[in-house]
Image (tube, rainbow, N blue to C red):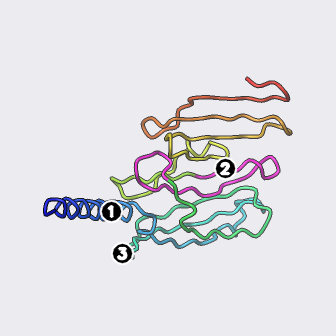
Amino acid sequence: MKHKNILIFLFASFVLLSNLASRQLEDKHSPKRFSFKVTDISNDNSTSNEDKIFKIDIYSSNTKKLIQSIEYKIESVSYDFFLEIDTTYFEDVNFDVYSDLLLPSGQGAMGRNDFSAVYLFDSLQNKFQYSEAFSNICNLRVNQEDQTIEGFIFNGGDPNFTFTKYEVINNSPVIKKIINQLFDIIE
């Protein structure tokens, strides 16, 4: 009976320590370690009426020190758009355990094609770096289960679309599979 109690104690201790370790890892990589100040700077004549430009100041939540500033543009906004950054804008796109920043950057096909400006978190520099390769993926979806990225774009009218599945190699999306549908023909 004594050995059974020791085993139960050791197992419970292991579970508690592993939960604490994973929580510390989550906190270390969490977007909550940053705070954001967003300023609309698009009131000049360099943009069209439908484009908005924002300055995003990123601060450390702990020290309140400015880490970096990003100038960010969203195209074809046909309504009064205001950007407020919360946890919905974060996802680990390149599967390196750090949350990356995904900001809406434009739409097409009457709102069915969404584009995001993707900023990968660089843990060595403690900054977000713009990724053109990930930002060019329409309707980007992250599949954490099989660690792939999916893109989907409507081409012209209904039933025409292209579905692309990517794997991430060296911090870049690499095409793994493409499915095209043009009317009733699927390639």
User: What is the C-alpha distance between the residues marked 1 and 3?
Assistant: 23 Å
The residue stretch that appears in magenta: 92-117
Q: Which mark is residue 115?
A: 2
Q: Quadrant of residue 184?
A: top right
Q: Quadrant of residue 85?
A: bottom right
Q: Residue at x 13, y 63 (%)?
A: 2
Q: Inspect the magenta stretch and tell me whether residue 75 lies in it.
A: no
Coordinates of residue 72 in the picture (x, y in percent): 59, 59
Q: Secondary structure at mark 1?
A: helix
Q: Nearer the viewer, mark 1 or mark 3?
A: 1
Query: Which amino acid, mark 1?
Result: Asn
Q: In the depicted view, which residue is nearer to us: 120 or 68?
A: 120
> Which residue was labeled with disc 1?
19
> Which residue was labeled with disc 3?
62
Whether residue 122 sits left or right of residue 153 in the image: it is: left
Whether residue 139 sits left or right of residue 111 in the image: it is: left
